[in-house]
Amino acid sequence: MKPGAASRPVAPPSAPQRVDASGGARIVDARDVVDARIAGHAGVAYRSRAQPCAAALALVALLVGGPVTAEEGRDRWTLAVAGGRRTVARKPDG
């Protein structure tokens, strides 16, 4: 974030689902769907390697711009980005 820029609140998840907080490997999927007329492209997608639950939560927090915990029971977050929306999902490996 640029110095002096205002932070934006994290939007509540769309259709939250329960996740197993007991650990195990997780994959994080992120997808930005944006209006190509605004952004110059239709969006991007990213899939992480399998990683421990705590590392996956840290990556989700980075992608959604705020703290997340396993106790929230979420595995999907959706928030507004310039020209569209970002969806971040945490999934069991396999």
Image (spheres, grey):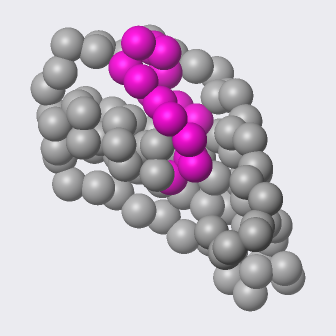
Q: Please tell me whether residue 14 is drawn above or below residue 87 in the rendered image.
A: above
Instruction: Decide if residue 56 is on the left or right side of residue 43.
Output: left
Q: Which x, y percent locates residue 76?
A: 52, 32
Q: Is residue 23 visible?
A: yes
Instruction: Read off the magenta span.
Output: 63-77
Q: Residue at x 56, y 46 (%)?
A: 64
Q: Residue at x 81, y 67 (%)?
A: 83
Q: Which x, y percent locates residue 46?
A: 41, 62
Instruction: Decide if residue 54 is on the left or right side of residue 68.
Output: left
Quadrant that contains the N terminus: bottom right
- The tally of labels here is 0
Q: Residue at x 23, y 31 (%)?
A: 53
Quadrant that contains the C terminus: top left
Q: Is residue 93 visible?
A: no
In front here: 51 or 65? 65
Instruction: Decide if residue 60 is on the left or right side of residue 48.
Output: right
Q: Residue at x 56, y 41 (%)?
A: 66
In front here: 55 or 42? 55
Quick one: which residue is furthest to the bottom in this view?
40
| The stretch drawn in magenta includes residue 76 | yes
Quick one: which residue is furthest to the front in this view?
4
Q: Please tell me whether residue 76 is drawn above or below residue 38 in the rendered image.
A: above
Q: Which x, y percent locates residue 12?
A: 70, 28
Q: Which x, y percent locates residue 36?
A: 77, 79
| The stretch drawn in magenta includes residue 67 | yes
